[in-house]
Image (tube, rainbow, N blue to C red):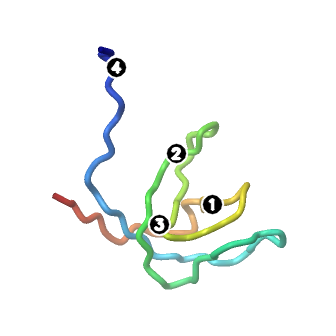
Amino acid sequence: MSKVKLPTPLPVQQFARCVNDAQRPADFVGDWPEAGRVYAVRVLPHVRTKQPQVHILGFYAERPYGAFAAHRFEQVADVWLN
């Protein structure tokens, strides 16, 4: 049996408010956030740059999109789940 332990995500649901919905790419296909609305999100680092990216839970977007820049959102709440 392997002794490798994978990181376990914290039991936290994050919520963020969209503050910038401008500059939608012309070739973007999928859901786009609206300014002022609060969304359930996950904030994960980009694979190469390690910069935080916001993934809106339940949104659909075609590749290469699917995550939004962190400057488009402000953190509203973290809800601890049990």
Residue bearing the label numbered 3: 57
User: Residue 78 falls in which quadrant of the image?
Assistant: bottom left
Q: Residue at x 69, y 59 (%)?
A: 65
Crowd band around label 3 with a 10 angstrom C-alpha radius: few (<14), some (14–19), many (20+): few
Instruction: Give the image location of residue 4, x and y in percent.
Output: 34, 20
40 displayed left or right of 3: right
Q: Name above or below for residue 45 compared with residue 27.
A: above
Q: Secondary structure at mark 1?
A: loop
Name the residue rendered at 48%, 83% in the picture.
Answer: 37
Q: Nearer the viewer, residue 39 or 69?
A: 39
Which element is circle 4 on? Answer: loop
- Label 4 crowding class (10 Å Cα cut-off): few <14, some 14-19, many 20+? few
Q: Residue at x 29, y 14 (%)?
A: 1
Whole-angstrom CA distance, mark 3 to mark 2, is 16 Å
Q: Name the residue that disc number 1 marks.
A: 66
Q: Secondary structure at mark 2?
A: strand
Label 3, secondary structure: give it: loop
Q: Which residue is mark 4?
A: 4
- Residue farthest to the front? 1
